[in-house]
Amino acid sequence: MTHTLSRQEPRVLFITPEVFPLCKTGGLGDVSAALPAALRAMRLDVRLLIPGYPQVLSGLKYKRKVADFSGLPQFPPARLLSARLAVSASASIPLFVIDCPELYRREGSPYLDETERDWPDNAFRFGLLSKIGAILASDASPLAWRPHIAHCNDWQTGLTPAYLHFHQGQKAATLMTIHNLAFQGIFPAGSVAELGLPASSFDIQGVEYFGSMSFLKAGLYYAHHITTVSPSYAAEIQTDPLGFGMQGLLAARHKNMTGIINGIDTQEWDPAIDSHIVRNYTRSRLSAKAPNKHALQQMMGLIVDPAIPLFGMIGRFSHQKGYDLLLQVAPQLTKIPAQLVVLGNGDAVLEDKLALLAATYPGKIAVTIGFNEALSHLIEAGADSFLMPSRFEPCGLNQMYSQHYGTPPLVHATGGLLDTVVDCTPETLADGSASGFLFKNMTAEDFLVTLKRAVIAYHDKKTWQCLQKNGMAKDFNWHASAAIYREIYLSLLEV
């Protein structure tokens, strides 16, 4: 039985494997800080639960022990620490940290070891996160604070709804957010017993997934409601190929699924106050954007020429993100002429190919392998257009940063990209909605045609300024999205 309060703002336990700035591997880290902050600004009592990785423990100054979990039969001893995560000069989010040295205190990323392979005990590492999330969201919690809603994020938290489903006492309602369906947390069938789930859960109507168990499927099956991070992605994942084997389950649950576009942190990403860029600028002072392009060209060893259109691209080097298409069109791009600057890392083969591309076209293409927060901001401010040729994109953030920075994005028409970028056409220019460029077919030919279309628009000063100002006028802050989450929470109070 869940809590059933109708005239009270819900208390929410937001369970996540990462949160900016303590630990971040992608957009989930940003969302895990920004959405709870926006919800707390609306006076909801939202608290985070995260694993105690080394960077989390070292990044929090004041921590105190609030509970002990040394008696969980399937897991090593753990302590629960309480702290606060500062999200602005005047606001912070209460934080619960699972301090389990055996599972979390190790070098490497939250999910991968130094050789970029999954930690072999990830089932237990995120099984513990899910289990403690379920305990805190039930009458078994050792804490006085009890949530009405357990908000779970991606596969790493997917067992929380399953554990709660089989809990016999009072428990919170559950919401499962899919940030990227491609990552599903699949482990051997024997993990079901090892993680303390009943044998009956290993069923097609449960955690079973093609003979294995899936953390994500558990969350999607047992959660009371499902959200994805854009309306278009919510529709796409109900069919093949973007359903990645889960399309049948998701289609069956479509009445309990909502697509909600992520917002962006407009304090962290604002060209008017951004400390990482050379010159601050606004929609009414667009000319001040130019020094950032000059600085970016100079820093990256590109020919310094304001007349040459400069395309930027940032992100994980992967097949999903369309870097194979970029490699195919880049030589033609230099002949237009146009320049390209790329920042990111990932697939080793793509890293090598991109490095070779930069070496082949010095002064025209620059590639930086790795992650650099300051450079990512300068690329958003200094590039003329931002590229996101993703095969699929649940939401995407950079296309929203780009519009906010007056850097019209060029994107594949999928997921959140389709929902947030309006293609430049005579009609959309006339009605004031045009904010970038979309290509429909995931081919190098269609990508190149659209690149050329963007270059033509760039050389038309009136058109380009219209695109820039339209994008900068959009409101991408978290308030609207947070309001939708609040309504879902309220509906779940009666579950």
Image (cartoon, rainbow, N blue to C red):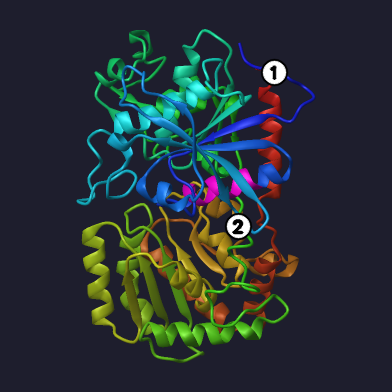
Q: Can you identify the residue that label 2 sits on?
A: 265
Tell me, yes or no, whether the two marked residues, 1 and 2, touch with CB atoms within 8 Å. Answer: no
- Tag 1, which secondary structure? loop
Q: Is residue 68 left or right of residue 368?
A: right
Q: Quadrant of the C terminus?
A: top right
Residue under the image location 34 percent in, 62 percent down: 323
Question: Is residue 246 at all visible to an observer of this figure?
Answer: no
- Tag 2, which secondary structure? loop
Would you place residue 353 above or below residue 44 in this image? Answer: below
Would you place residue 487 above or below residue 374 in this image? Answer: above
Would you place residue 495 above or below residue 77 in this image? Answer: above
Amino acid beneath label 2: Asp
Q: Can you identify the residue that label 1 sits on?
A: 494
Would you place residue 287 above or below residue 423 in this image? Answer: below
Q: Which residues are magenta?
A: 28-37
Amino acid beneath label 1: Glu
Q: Is residue 2 magenta?
A: no
